[in-house]
Image (cartoon, helix red, strand yellow):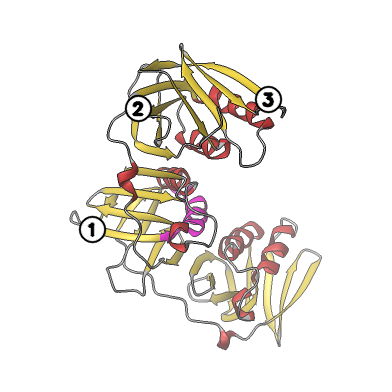
Amino acid sequence: MKFRVERDTLADAVTWVARGLPARPPVPVLAGVLLSADADAGTITLSAFDYEVSAKVSVEADVEEGGTVLVLGRLLADISRNLPNKPIEVAATGSKVEVSCGSSRFSLLQMPVGDYPSLPVAPEASGSIDGQAFTQAVAQVSIAADRGDTLPILTGVRVEIEGDKMTLLATDRYRLAMRELTWRPSATDTSYVGLIPARTLSETARALGASASVDLALGSEGSNDGLIGFEAGSRRTTSRLLDGEYPKVTSIFPTSSETEAVISTHELVEAVKRVSLVAERNTPVRLRFADGQVTIEAGTGEDAQASEAVGAEITGPEIEIAFNPHFLLDGLGAVGTPFSRLSFTQASRPAVLSGQEDEDGEADASYRYVLMPVRFAN
């Protein structure tokens, strides 16, 4: 195998493919990236697979001799990113892969290609979605997914599709995020439910979201070994779905509200950040909504204390409630609108956060973030 390729082209391709390589692979070859050069097509294809997630990309190259090699993926990514901005030559010589760029020379050990697992075959494309909308929706929802291993099913994002409507949902039992959006299905009667690991989905959305459109390959129940596929341009990736029945958490959404407050998102974020500086770990910030403002407080007794007030449009009776400040800030950071609307039933019940463009406008119900209150001492 021998080919020449532009530095940025190779660096982008190998970084994309190697992004999900396991830090401690159960089998040494899973730390590798597969490079296949096709002289007839004038392309090189880079692939990676860890039995859970696969990634594959093809880029143009001047291929002198075709072939396939397997080398350490993270090492190749580090090398290609740090080479001078000149064409890179890659050639297989004996048991080594020689990488040269300008006066830089690297010699990488070939790994056994025969031991590398076959990449999964993605299902057929089921439709497409706007790249920017996809990236935003995944970011808004994945913040609420569980980051621990106690309940693996909660580490996923639930994707439900009916026709052209897509709903993303995630919860860690302390908050719940749901985003509804539209996509372009190949068939109008498309129906699908899948649970995708949140970390994988987030990384995929960030990597593909710059594209104008992302193709989704959903597969059908019981086929394709529980895989979902994503493709944008020449980049393709698959992820194995999580098994198990996701809890029916949508019943947590309150059906009515007693008090509602509309606040500048930026002002509330800055105030919560400042006040929470004195909040010890795992202690809440208290918010009192009354008299046209929300007063944020933290700290009690002889501990450090802080308070700040932010103007708010409040309807309904006054209410005092407490939240984990990090969870509250996550939600405020996700709404993506100048104003935020907080809806309450009572201080012991979940609150609903949504965004809106104008102070006097309507709430954007396509994204809702439910936050469980924290008990606090009076």
Q: Which labelled disc corresponds to residue 305?
A: 3
Q: Quadrant of residue 124?
A: bottom left
Q: Is residue 200 above or below residue 141?
A: below
Q: CB under 8 Å between callouts 3 and 2?
A: no
Residue 17: % across, % down: 56, 65
Q: Earlier in the sequence, mark 1 or mark 3?
A: 1
Residue lying furthest top: 291
**Residue wearing tag 2:** 363
Verify whether residue 201 appears in magenta.
yes
Left or right, 74 with respect to 372, comes to: right
Q: Secondary structure at mark 2?
A: loop
Q: Which residue is mark 1?
A: 191
Q: Please name which of the two marks, 1 or 2, marks the residue nearer to the observer.
A: 2
Residue 51 location (% of width, % of height): 50, 75
| Amino acid beneath label 2 | Ala
Q: Nearer the viewer, mark 3 or mark 2?
A: 3
Q: What's the distance in space between the residues labelled 1 and 3, CA to CA?
A: 52 Å
